[in-house]
Amino acid sequence: MSTNPILAPHRSIRLFRADPLPEGTIQRLVAEAQRAPTDATGQMYSFVRVLDRARRRRIAELSGDQQHVLDAAEFLVTCADVHRLVRVLELHGRVPGEYPATGLHFAVIDATLATQRLIDAAEAIGLGTVCIGGILNGVEELIELLALPRGVLPLFGLCLGWPGEAPVARPRVALTSVLHADTYHELTPAAAAADVTAMAPITRSSNWPAVLGRYFAAGGTMEEREPALRRALERQGFAWSRE
Ligand SMILES: Cc1cc2nc3c(=O)[nH]c(=O)nc-3n(C[C@H](O)[C@H](O)[C@H](O)COP(=O)(O)O)c2cc1C
């Protein structure tokens, strides 16, 4: 089904020109991000702007030696953050509650909505961006590197800079695969096959299930990341027991 686009198409950019961003651009973009909706007024996110070159180099290494992490004019780390509001409560004589799952839920939503608005604003002024989930490969060291207190969890990085490439917009699954009417409809084999065909150009191998498998199948990178992320969740105060 073809649709009538409303926004300019988003594309992740992985090749950046060396030029810096004009003074004040990051502050303008973060101010836009702050206009995102926020659950319960909490604003449960923080951005860490990585200015120090050595720190950026280490983050690029931890992320699997991604060159664009080094080349982008700016690099932010989006964090879920319940620490700041707990501090407001404590400074105002209130005892913070115990809600690690809800805190994580709220903070991931707030952080993601704010970052998407920042991305939209960056693209609107001609900048390119790419999110960097690769930081999770070294999440425990990253927490140290950025001195994140308990209650703050790094979610993903964001490269920002002037685009040095103009890639075609990458494919997505069918609209009917993501839009449900009243109740959830199961993906049929035919619809799954159509999605796999549609997504083929996103991979060099034209084999999207193989790519998904490398990430999400048994023995894939998600399973590899799981133990360190669980430890990080525990350490940062976002873990809970089953009972
Ligand atoms: C949370 C998140 C993490 C991502 N991590 C990486 C990454 O580590 N490296 C990278 O090159 N792209 C990364 N991406 C970009 C995706 O690969 C990209 O959005 C996807 O292939 C679709 O392409 P498009 O953004 O150009 O439409 C990430 C995207 C998201 C949302």
Image: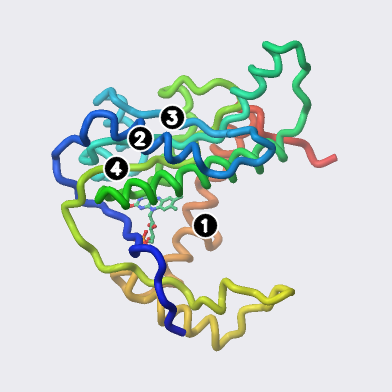
The residue indicated by pointer 1 is 219
Which residue carries the number 4 mark?
160
Q: Considering the numbered disc 1 on the image, is that residue within a helix, a strand or a loop?
A: loop
Give, as a three-letter code, the residue at label 3. Leu
Quadrant containing the C terminus is top right
C-alpha gap between disc 4 and disc 1: 32 Å
Q: Nearer the viewer, mark 4 or mark 1?
A: 4
* Labels 3 & 1 near each other (Cβ < 8 A): no
User: Residue 82 occupies which quadrant of the picture?
Assistant: top right
Label 1, residues with CA under 10 Å away: few <14, some 14-19, many ≥20: few
Q: CA distance from mark 3 to mark 4?
A: 19 Å
The residue lying at 64 percent from left, 31 percent from top is: 234
Name which quarter of the figure residue 27 lies in.
top left
Q: Residue at x 65, y 41 (%)?
A: 39
Amino acid under disc 4: Leu
For marks 4 and 2, the one nearer the N-term is: 2
Amino acid on which disc 1 is placed: Gly
Specify whether tag 2 is near ligand 1 (CB below 8 Å): no
Distance from the alpha carbon under mark 2 to that under mark 1: 42 Å
Rendering coords of residue 178 (x, y %): 57, 71
